Amino acid sequence: MEKTMKFLFATIMLVMLSSPLVNAQKKSKHVPTPTPSPAPAPGPAYVNLTELLSVAGPFHTFLNYLQSTKVIDTFQNQANDTEEGLTLFVPKDSAFSSLKKPSLANLTHDQLKQLCLFHALPHYYSLSEFKNLSSMGPVSTFAGGDYTLNFTDVSGSIQMTSGWSVTKVSSSVFSTEPVAIYQVDKVLLPEAIFGTDIPPMPAPAPAPEAKAPVADAPADVTADGKSPSSSPLNASASCRVVASLVLALAGGLVLLL
């Protein structure tokens, strides 16, 4: 009887262990751990244009214009809140101090604002990309409308023409996408503000003429270009010699006679 009970118990345990429910529970314990998704790539670092222009180069005059017209806020939003980015051309303080005509003192607030917007492109451009701009013709600036710039690649040097100004990119201040800041030698003056009466470019100074070397006069030529034999003094001396010879011959003939 005892053996029968043990046999029955073993049979029940075997049936329970081989049941689908138990097998499903065993399998559920070995479910693989899901692979974690990669972390999103960090976005571009925030660029503070005010701080950057304050410490990089003597750009205080241009920065003051940007702040007084609130254009600095427009550029800041374009740099950090759009996918296009910003390309900014910054004149040095000396470019403003050397500007005599036309003067910026008579500009209205709106004209000064347009002048500041004229110094930026609403897109990020590296130095290598300016070669493509040189073949595109006039390029629209942040000021829009007729406020355009023409770019030319001259042996790797980027030159730009704004009508009144012809200048070049002299150095790169900051160039990390989405913001590029380039130093220029002159203030960009648009025709839309100052008109089309553009002063002519100054002509280059003529080269000094080379003077021909003066040859030394020959020894037998006097200062006035005559030979010593043709001077009046020499002619008079010759006449006296001839006269003396004639008198001597005449005297000799008289003695012979």
Image (cartoon, rainbow, N blue to C red):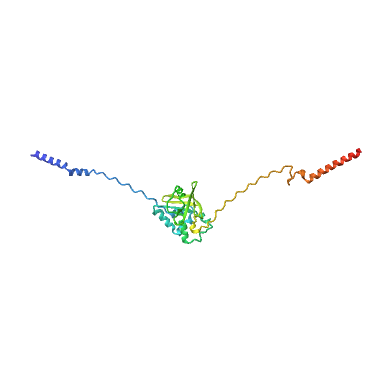
Q: Position of residue 60 (x, y in %)?
A: 48, 56
Q: Position of residue 172 (x, y in %)?
A: 47, 49
- The answer to whether residue 53 is left or right of residue 203 is left
Q: Position of residue 3 (x, y in %)?
A: 9, 38
Identity of the residue furthest to the right in this view:
257
Identity of the residue furthest to the front in this view:
257
- Whether residue 205 is situated above or below residue 245 in the rendered picture: below
- The answer to whether residue 90 is left or right of residue 16 is right
| Residue drawn at 42 percent across, 57 percent down | 74
The quadrant in which the C terminus is found is top right
| Residue drawn at 77 percent across, 44 percent down | 230
| Residue drawn at 14 percent across, 41 percent down | 15
Identity of the residue furthest to the left in this view:
1
Using the rendered view, name the quadrant where residue 222 is placed.
top right
Using the rendered view, name the quadrant where residue 234 is placed.
top right
Q: Is residue 67 visible?
A: yes
Q: Which residue is at the front of the view, 155 or 72?
A: 155
| Residue drawn at 82 percent across, 44 percent down | 239
- Whether residue 125 is situated above or below residue 107 in the rendered picture: above
Q: Is residue 64 visible?
A: no
